[in-house]
Image (spheres, helix red, strand yellow):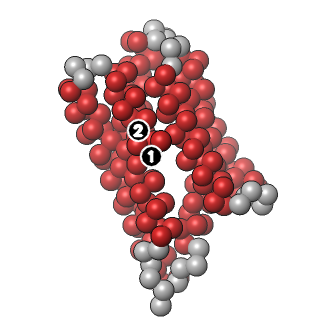
Amino acid sequence: MKPWLTRNVWNLSWVSFLQDAASEMLYPLMPVLLTSLLHAPAAVVGIIEGLAEGVAATMKLLSNRINHYVPRKLMVLLGYAGAGIGKVIIAAAGAWPVVLVGRLTDRVGKGLRSAPRDALLIHGSDKAHRGKIIGFHRTADTLGAVLGPILALGLLAAFDNQIRSVLWFAAIPAVL
C-alpha cells in the first residue's frame, strides 16, 4: 500500500495553511480599512463581499472546463498566485475600488485552484487513504484559519492598532 502523506499532500497542505492564515488576518480588518481609512460608505463593504463571493462561485464552476485546457498544477499555481497578489493589492490600496480589484483577484484565484487542488491531493492515492488525505489538508487549512485572527490581534497590539502594518504583514504568508 502506498504511503498517504505524499509530497503533494504535504506541500498543498502547507500552502493552504499559509493562505488561510493570510486570509483570516486580512479579511476581518477589511471593513475597518474600507470605512475608516479609505472612507468608503458601509454599503461598499457589502458590495465588495457579494461580488467577491459571486466571482469565487463562478470560477469554481468554470474551473472544471478550464481544466480541460490547462494542466492542474498550473491551475493550482495560478490560483494561489492570484490569491497572494490579491492580498498584496488590498494591503497597498489607497482607494476602495483598488480593494475591490484585490478582493476579486483573490477570489478568482480561490475559485480557480479549489477543484484541481483537491484532485492533485488524491491523485495516485489508494482509495482507503483518501479520507485521511482530505482530512489532513482540511486540518492544515483550518489551523491557518484559527492562527490568522490570533496573529492579527497580536500584530494590532504590537503595531499600536496600525491596520495598514497588519495588512502588509498578512501579505507575507500569502506570498509564501
The image quadrant that residue 118 belongs to is bottom right
Q: Position of residue 109 (x, y in %)?
A: 60, 44
Question: Callout 1: helix, strand or loop?
Answer: loop
> Are dots 1 and 2 in contact, CB under 8 Å?
yes
Q: Report the disc number at residue 51.
A: none
Query: Relative to the observer, which residue lies in front, 162 or 110?
Result: 162
Q: Report the disc number at residue 172.
A: 2
Q: Which residue is mark 1?
A: 176
Crowd band around label 2 with a 10 angstrom C-alpha radius: few (<14), some (14–19), many (20+): some
Residue type (three-letter) at the residue carrying disc 2: Ile
95 w.r.t. 149: above or below: above
Let me know if residue 43 appears in the view.
no
The image quadrant that residue 81 belongs to is top right
Q: Position of residue 117 (x, y in %)?
A: 57, 60
149 w.r.t. 17: above or below: above
Residue type (three-letter) at the residue carrying disc 1: Leu
Crowd band around label 1 with a 10 angstrom C-alpha radius: few (<14), some (14–19), many (20+): few
